[in-house]
Image (tube, rainbow, N blue to C red):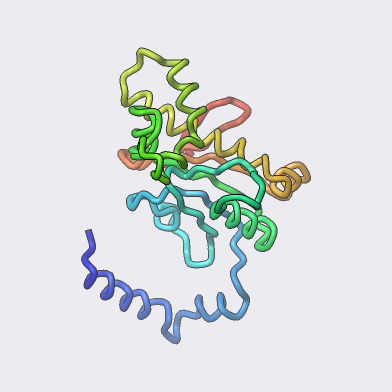
Amino acid sequence: MASLQQLIEGFRRFRERHFTRDNALYSTLVARGQTPKTLVVSCCDSRVDPALVLDCEPGDLFVIRNVANLVPPAESSNSGHHGTSAALEFGVRNLKVEHIIVFGHAQCSGIRALIETGETNSDTESYIGDWMRLAQSARAEVLQEMPDAPLEDKIDACELRAILVSLRNLETFPWIRERVENGTLTLHGWYFDIEDGKLLQYDAAAGKFAAL
């Protein structure tokens, strides 16, 4: 785990790699602007950096990170704060991304708390508890389908099911649904198993996740 000084030293190495005469990547990104083809909704978990896991360069991905990689359903913009929704709008309507990946992962603390307690915090002032209720339907489905399964199996299943909830919620945004229907935008559900390094993709036709 990096100390503050290690972060500073890391920045210096980064600058040496990317801001030298023989590396014009950032000069190009500044001159041409960002044009990522893929938007990723990922978890805040420090072990799951989509750019690192997918071996991408700066400018390749437009990344939205939040607790448990959840996508809320479309709601009126007149109430509350909609950070994830606003970022989705920018990626889809301004950057014209061609793919959206909901990037879930194993060992998600938010999903574990959801399965164990029904929400992450009973405190009425908890932002996390309210946020995790977005995945309550995933929890309910898992508990109904496998009530006697071991806890860890329920958590694994809920991590996958929450990805499907977010995929459904994506299509509640009219500007996403329109582009999906006209074939200019494709939605994907991916799951990174941090224990064994496997990456799974949801196959809608088969109704299950399979290894990539």
- Horizontal and vertical percent for residue 15? 37, 79
Q: Residue at x 33, y 27 (%)?
A: 116
Q: Can you say whether 139 is above or below 40 in the image? A: above
- Horizontal and vertical percent for residue 127? 42, 46
Quarter-of-image position of residue 96: bottom right
Q: Residue at x 56, y 42 (%)?
A: 72
Whether residue 199 is visible to the viewer of this picture, yes or no, is: no
Q: Can you say whether 8 is above or below 76 in the image? A: below
- Horizontal and vertical percent for residue 134? 51, 37
> Quick one: which residue is furthest to the bottom in this view?
21
> Quick one: which residue is furthest to the right in this view?
182
Q: Residue at x 53, y 62 (%)?
A: 60
Q: If the image is split into quadrants, where does the N terminus sit?
A: bottom left
> Quick one: which residue is furthest to the top in this view?
148
Q: Can you say whether 193 is above or below 156 in the image? A: below
Out of 49 and 140, give the one closest to the viewer: 140
Q: Residue at x 50, y 41 (%)?
A: 190
Q: Can you say whether 53 is above or below 163 in the image? A: below
